Amino acid sequence: MLWFFSDPHFDHANIIKYCNRPFKHKDEMNDAIIQNINDRVSKDDELYCLGDWAFGSRKTLLQRSQVFLNRIHCKNVTLIKGNHDVREQKEIFPRFYDMYTVKVREGGEKKNIVLCHYPLRAWDKQHHGAFQIFGHCHGNLPDDRKLWSFDVGLDCHGMVPLSYDDVKEIMSHKEPLTDVRGRG
């Protein structure tokens, strides 16, 4: 199964205040996020973090990133680079990208999901039904019901990752697909 989330901001004490997160301190937040992930994601699942994994100085960020990754119980964790992530995290996350497209096969049909830390107005295969999911905004960007795109940030979804089925369900409430070139 595929799972998606963004903006855990592990070790970022101020994010609790900035985003009104329900925690007293960063250690409580770190533990709760990891527990929420492990409660949903199984060892054979794929987990995609759409950026802002952790916060701190470069050295601390790298050390702590590995600690948090080791506590998550799934086969593969892919990190899509956010504005608080650093290139050196490639040493920790063998699957580390600026942007990435997941290709899902269902009943003989292929669905593309474009992953980026930032929201996009247009993306590859958009006019063929591709989804785009993002983070970065912490729920502060109003949803556009005309775009098959939305924020998978933890602050938007009760501090839990979303499954591919969750993503499809959310997208099913969007308006019917309209070609970005103005054609239906």
Image (tube, rainbow, N blue to C red):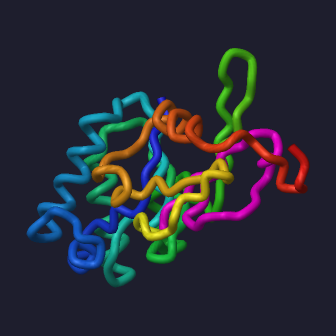
Residue 27's image quarter? bottom left
Residue at 49%, 30% (x, y): give it.
Answer: 165
Taking the image as shown, residue 169 lies to the left or right of residue 71, namely right
Front residue (pair 13, 167) = 167
Instruction: Please tell me whether residue 136 is drawn above or below residue 160 in the rendered image.
Output: below
Taking the image as shown, residue 19 lies to the left or right of residue 103, namely left
Is residue 97 on the magenta stretch? Answer: no
Picture coordinates of residue 175, whole percent (x, y): 66, 43
What stretch of residues is rendered in magenta?
114-136
Is residue 123 on the magenta stretch? Answer: yes
Front residue (pair 83, 120) = 120
Residue at 86%, 43% (x, y): give it.
Answer: 184
Residue at 74%, 23% (x, y): give it.
Answer: 109
Front residue (pair 64, 138) = 138
Taking the image as shown, residue 94 lies to the left or right of residue 113, namely left
Picture coordinates of residue 117, whole percent (x, y): 55, 64
